[in-house]
Amino acid sequence: MAGRLTRQVDMTEGSLWDKILLFGIPVAATAILQQLYTTADVAVAGRLVGTNAEAGVGSNVYIISLLVSLFQGISLGANVTIATAIGAGEAEKAHRAVHTAVVLALVGGVAFAVATQPMVGPLLGVLSVPGEVLADATSYLRIYLLGLPVIFLYDFEAAILRSVGDTWTPLKALAVSSALNLALDLVVAGPLAAGARGLATTTVASNAVAVAILLAYLLRTPSDVRIVPRDLRLDPWAARRILSIGLPAGIQSALYSVANIVIQGAINSLGATVMAGSSASSSIESMSYYVINAFGQAATTFVGQNNGAHRQDRCARTLRLCLVEAYALCGTIIALIVIFGRGLVGVFNPNPAIVAQGYTRVRFVISSQLFSIAIDVFSGYLRGYGYSLWPAVWTFFSIVVIRLAYVFLLFPQNPTFPFLLAVYPITLGLNAAGLVVMWALVHRSLARQPQPRAKGV
């Protein structure tokens, strides 16, 4: 493939504020629908199967979040690589990156599916899952892990489309599969009485439907990211570029889940009621966080294309607008969740004791997401320029090291749920402060470099 590139969304010309918003809303909705796969499983298990099944499925939330965060982060490498090539007008590089991304997704998904099966027992052991819910937790996780190839492929397909500004097609595909997942959940948990094993199977099958829809679209789209089966191969340049950006980004995202797995182990030590309330609250948190993350992805994609086109002025404006729009929209969502948190937790389980524990978590963790806005937008900006390693290193220290020290050294001195949850605002605030410093250093470095003349100027 060669020749003139066309953009579905021209990120290098025209107004930015509306394009960022129109880009971000479908990304947020798509991520929320992805989360609803597990959320639906937790809710259906609680309503139709029982508290043990709900706790068992919910125990896997952080493990699943770790894998999803890792895969989505790696897929950002494809997003940046393709978007930068498109911004620079390099059609052949964009074409090679698209096909390399698909191959990486397939190979990586299969490798993870095989490698993680022996890890099921140890992972649930780290979480200190109680014996009465261990069988449900194990069966759900094993089946989910077998479906990693389709989950990984969906993330890369969505990243490919987002590199040209198409955020609606991944949303439509996931809307179809999410509706299918909910319908199948009700069948397997109700009439079929298949329990956690059936819920995991419907999740994998529904994800496969979304993958098939996007693949069919990419095979026939007239856009610059069309997949040509005979061109599917690993290109060394594209693979290095994708992984050099994607792996640190994926590790940075996954590090949150690594730390949260340890925190979940501490939560599990507080009993089944706290576990169930925490599981319900964490599902709500994930939905609000994905709205925040959408602006981080917008920053990555818009900065990637404009950096490729040598429009540094638009890169700076992208950062400012992403911050303003994210704090306006996400700040409102955070306030509403805190106000109506009890009712939202009650959707998952109406037990008053569980609702009380879930709302305790809402107050601590949801309010801390004000720091997450800065974290995701500044991280997205840095990734758009290809700076992915140092944010991951800082996240390891500020999130993993500090949270582990808190859980193992301080929590035993005061083993209460509110004290444990205080670790979230402490570590997120520290992480945000460090990323702002990194942005300032990168911004100063870029300002000192001679800038090539922007195309068309």
Image (cartoon, rainbow, N blue to C red):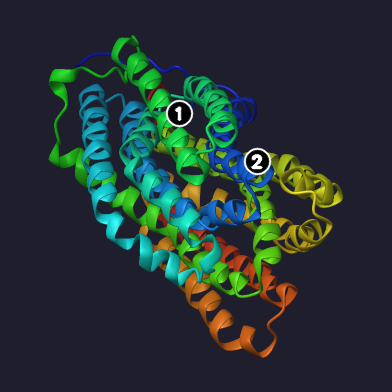
Circle 1 sits in a helix, a strand or a loop, which is it? helix
Across and down, in percent, residue 343 comes to 83, 46
Question: Where is residue 356 drawn, in percent x and y?
Answer: 81, 61
The correct choice, above or below, for 347 with respect to 121 in the image is above
Q: Is 245 left, or right, of 404 in this rendering?
A: left
Image check: 301 left or right of 2?
Answer: right
Mark 2, residue position? 48
Q: Is residue 291 left or right of residue 116?
A: right
Residue 445 in sight here: yes
- Number of marks in picture: 2
- Above or below, 367 relative to 264: above
First reached walking from the N terminus: tag 2 or tag 1: 2
Q: Residue furthest right?
A: 339
Report the residue at 57% width, 61% height from top: 436
| Tag nearer the camera, 2 or 1 | 2
Q: Nearer the viewer, residue 395 or 63?
A: 63
Q: CA–CA distance between discs 2 and 1?
A: 20 Å
Q: Position of residue 284 (x, y in %)?
A: 68, 47
Judge by depth and name the residue closer to the eye, 320 or 241. 241
Q: Amino acid at mark 2?
A: Leu
Taking the spot 57% from the left edge, 24% from the top edge, the residue there is: 179
For the N terminus, the quadrant is top left
Q: Secondary structure at mark 2?
A: helix
Report x, y in % for residue 125.
Answer: 43, 70
Question: Toward the viewer: 239 or 284?
Answer: 284
Q: Which residue is mark 1?
A: 206
Q: Residue at x 28, y 42 (%)?
A: 109
Q: Is residue 352 depicted above or below 287 in this figure?
A: below
Closest to the observer: 162 or 288? 288
Q: Quadrant of the C terminus?
A: top left
Direction from residue 30 to residue 104 in the image, left or right: left
